[in-house]
Amino acid sequence: MVDIAVVGTGRIGTHHIGALVNDVQGARVTALVDTDIARAEEIARTYGIDCVAASLGEAFEKVSVDAVVISTPVVTHLPLIRTAADAGKAIFTEKPIAKDVSEAREAVDAATQAGVIFQVGFNRRFSESWARAHDNVASGVVGDVQRYHSITRDPGPYRGDPARTPLGTIFKETLIHDFDTIN
């Protein structure tokens, strides 16, 4: 079993918690970390998770953790990545890695120096249809690509804390999937 702490119990964090608990064999969510303790406790009761903590460090002190899933606002990613890397934990973070290229490089360096697995949540890379489209473009089946047209929609309006959500969130946290697929 891989013991996992999920940081962030908002919309995407709750999605990850449900997937890890219900769909991923060999995964065990041992801790939920959030500054909104009441929300985290409610979700913990729903999924039968015993540990709720206000910080990642607190979770590490309370329960066994092998890996960390970061599903918090982008401005919090770098400090959480550093904390997890310094503790030798594998890391999965929601995209984008950080708020800018400099911080993204710092995050990658922290994981590399710690020798831990570090993955960014570009789930479309693992979608069968996207992989097939990539193979068709790469092999030349579709010819010489001149234009890429993409329409991106979020499942609903973002209702996060505007003080913690930087301008351009739709581009950095949703449309970024389209930029990734172009690569």
Image (cartoon, helix red, strand yellow):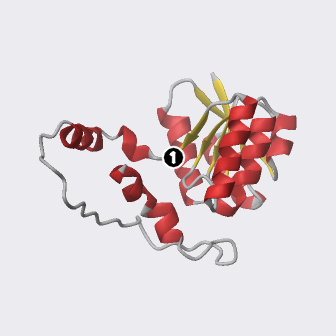
In this rendering, position of residue 22 left or right of residue 29? left
In this rendering, position of residue 69 left or right of residue 139? right
The reply to whether residue 1 is visible in this rendering is: yes
Toward which corner of the image does residue 50 lie, by quadrant? top right
Toward which corner of the image does residue 34 lie, by quadrant? bottom right
The residue located at (71%, 48%) in the rendering is 106
Toward which corner of the image does residue 3 lie, by quadrant? top right
152 or 109, which is in the foreground? 109
In this rendering, position of residue 154 left or right of residue 85? left
Question: Crowding near pointer 1: few (<14 within 10 Å), some, many (20+)?
Answer: some
The reply to whether residue 73 is visible in this rendering is: no
Q: Name the residue under label 1.
A: 121
Callout count: 1
Figure check: 5 above or below 159: above
In this rendering, position of residue 9 left or right of residue 55? left
**Quadrant of the snapshot with the N terminus:** top right
The residue located at (42%, 63%) in the rendering is 175
Figure check: 110 above or below 38: above
The residue located at (47%, 68%) in the rendering is 171
66 or 178, which is in the foreground? 178
SS type, badge 1:
loop
The residue located at (53%, 74%) in the rendering is 168
* Residue 167 place in picture, x, y as percent: 58, 77
Figure check: 167 above or below 114: below
* Residue 129 place in picture, x, y as percent: 25, 42
- Residue type, numbered disc 1: Gly
* Residue 17 place in picture, x, y as percent: 58, 44
Figure check: 28 above or below 1: below
